[in-house]
Amino acid sequence: MVVVPTFGHTPGSVATFVNVSPAQRFVHVGDLINLRESIERNVGKSWLMRRFTDEDSARTQAEVAKLVQLHAGDPELIILPAHDRRAFVELFGADNGAVPPCIGTPDGLKP
């Protein structure tokens, strides 16, 4: 596991690189982006989300640009944002009620 700072969102924000196996590697980017498709589309968070959640939008956008470069150079590396349920399920599988509600749906209810 490797932890690196990511600037702009909040003080102390980090990305965590994890090698589960040689074939399964991912980086958890916290709240740097909301959805993995942000990297695929080369766009960060919406203006409203940046306005209310990022300490420094310009630095956040610079970090997002680094993620886009990283993805282009290593497309097999899975980028996992903290709140992207689809990316979580693709990486770890459906939770079948075993994942705490803070990651799943409100109050643990099935969608």
Image (spheres, helix red, strand yellow):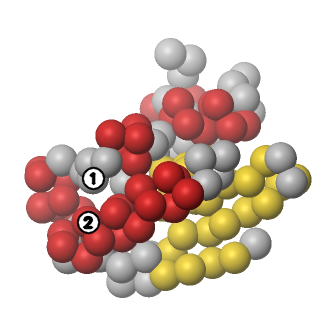
Q: Is residue 22 left or right of residue 103?
A: right
Query: Compared with residue 13, is residue 74 higher up or lower down, i.e. above or below?
Result: above
Kindly give the residue lying farthest to the top in the view shown. Answer: 111
User: CB atoms at circles 1 and 2 under 8 Å apart?
Assistant: yes
Give the residue number, with chain letter if any, for mark 1: 44
**Looking at the image, can residue 90 be seen?**
yes
Q: Nearer the viewer, residue 6 or 65?
A: 65
Q: Position of residue 69 (x, y in %)?
A: 44, 61
Q: Which mark is residue 61?
A: 2
Q: Nearer the viewer, residue 18 or 30?
A: 18
Residue under the image location 59 percent in, 47 percent down: 75
Kindly give the residue lying farthest to the front in the view shown. Answer: 73
Q: Is residue 95 left or right of residue 80?
A: right
Q: Position of residue 1 (x, y in %)?
A: 76, 72
Q: Amino acid at mark 2?
A: Gln
Q: CA distance from mark 1 to mark 2?
A: 6 Å
Image quarter of residue 50: bottom left
Residue under the image location 35 percent in, 62 percent down: 64
Query: Compared with residue 87, is residue 80 higher up or lower down, i.e. above or below?
Result: below
Residue under the image location 69 percent in, 76 percent down: 2
For the image, the number of numbered tags is 2
Q: Residues within 10 Å of mark 1 (few under 14, many from 20)?
A: many
Q: Amino acid at mark 1?
A: Gly
Residue under the image location 33 percent in, 40 percent down: 41
Q: Secondary structure at mark 1?
A: loop
Image quarter of residue 17: bottom right
Q: Which mark is residue 27?
A: none
Q: Position of residue 23 (x, y in %)?
A: 83, 47
Q: Is residue 91 left or right of residue 85?
A: right
Return the disc, 1 or 2, that comes first in the chain's sequence.
1
Q: Position of residue 11 (x, y in %)?
A: 36, 83
Q: Nearer the viewer, residue 20 or 82?
A: 20
